[in-house]
Image (spheres, helix red, strand yellow):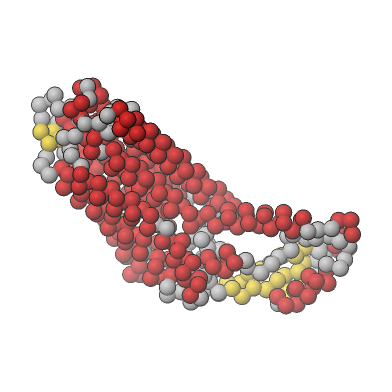
Amino acid sequence: MYKENTYWKNVLTIVPIVGSCVATIIYFLRLFARRVGGTTKWQLEDVLMGIGVLISYGATAFVVYTAFNGVGLPTSTLPPDERRRVQFGSWMIQKFWAPSMAFIKISIIVFLRRLLGTLTLYRAFTMGLIVFVTCWAIAALLVNIFQCWPVQYYYDKDLNGHCMGHQREFFQCMGSLALIEDVFILCLPIPVVWRLKITMSQKFAVTFVFSLGGLVCIFSLLRLIEFRRFVVTDLASSSALESIWTVLEINVAIITGSLPLLRPLLQGILGHMRSVSNSKRSHPSSGRYYRPSMPTPPDDLHKYFDPRPLDHTTTVKSTTKETTMPPDQFYKYERDLEGHQSSDIELHGIAVTTGVDQNVEEKSDIGNAEPVSNRNWPL
């Protein structure tokens, strides 16, 4: 029995803390990526996700709390005080799970609505899903609180009270609805993505990014299956694995809901790596100056994760004039420019920038109030 208790104590301490730390890091990287992408103002989906992250700390804290109060052992073998503590911890986990998941899910729906919600039917469906998730979370929270009367009777059976019947069936019902919501959210962007005028490989790439949310469905399903072995009269031994799936479901939802917004940060990292690689190929002793910041056509990452057609020209600015030339002439200009010394470039004060003209009819808002034609996708 001691070994079993030690095992669950370690698992229920390490897994929730590590998962919560990773989810928090990804969320802050999401906010940093906003700044890298030129957006300093938080959007509604960022605020909602942040609230979900904060509430998730409560679930993590009480899972760890149960780990130090006899979880994994039969309730009948625990001292009365420890029995009350582990049952109280199990009761409190339920209070944080539904609100946290609701804020996370609504954050993802708002993001998809802002990104792809150009169709009236799509916007109506996403709004209906937001209302459904909200009602589900409120119902789950209220019933979880008042499933026993007085409410303390859930974790303190020394009191005079009673609990509602079919408690396990209620948990299964709430878990089933949560899984259905996850599946709907997972499928939301797929029809829109596959209607875009992009290549098949681009469609698969964008679909793969959104499909990472399927991991949330997996943990939600595992949690639902575990409820079949859930015994409300023996929470200490029957709630250990369910607690693991609960915190993993929350943390994975935070991570997968934030990953699509990390593209500006990833672009910056890849650009820095290319700059370092290019600088190593420069030859200062020969008098040649290698320009790592010289514009290049969109890289593979941009090509796969920006499904809009690009008609780009390059603008060359000097101290006396500004001209626009097509890509083939620009690359000839670039090759000719490589033959000059760095001093020649400095004397003429030449700066090269790339202008991108994106042809789209739809308007959307991925992180600010500008139309989508003026911005890059965050994917």
Circle count: 0
In terms of image quadrants, where is residue 158? Answer: top left
Examine the image and state in which quarter residue 151 appears: top left
Left or right: where does residue 84 sit relative to residue 26? left
- Please report the residue visible at 44 percent of the width from the left and 39 percent of the height from the top: 18
- Residue 347: tell me if it is visible: no
Query: As displayed, is residue 1 above or below residue 222?
Result: above
Of 242 and 147, which appears nearest the observer? 242
Identity of the residue drawn at 31% across and 61% down: 184
Residue at 37%, 45% in the rendered image: 248
x and y, in percent, of residue 134 in the image: 28, 51
Q: From the viewer's perspective, is residue 328 above or below residue 226?
A: below
- Where is residue 57 drawn, in percent x and y? 39, 37
The spot of residue 1 in percent (x, y) is 27, 29
Residue at image location 35% in from the left, 48% down from the top: 249
One can see residue 275 in this view: yes
In the rendered view, does 294 fall on the left or right side of 300? right
The picture places residue 263, in percent across and down from the top left corner, at: 54, 57
Q: Is residue 101 left or right of residue 224?
A: right
| 122 or 13: nearer the viewer | 13
In this view, the residue in front, 304 or 236, is: 236
Which of the pair 361/189 is nearer the observer? Answer: 189
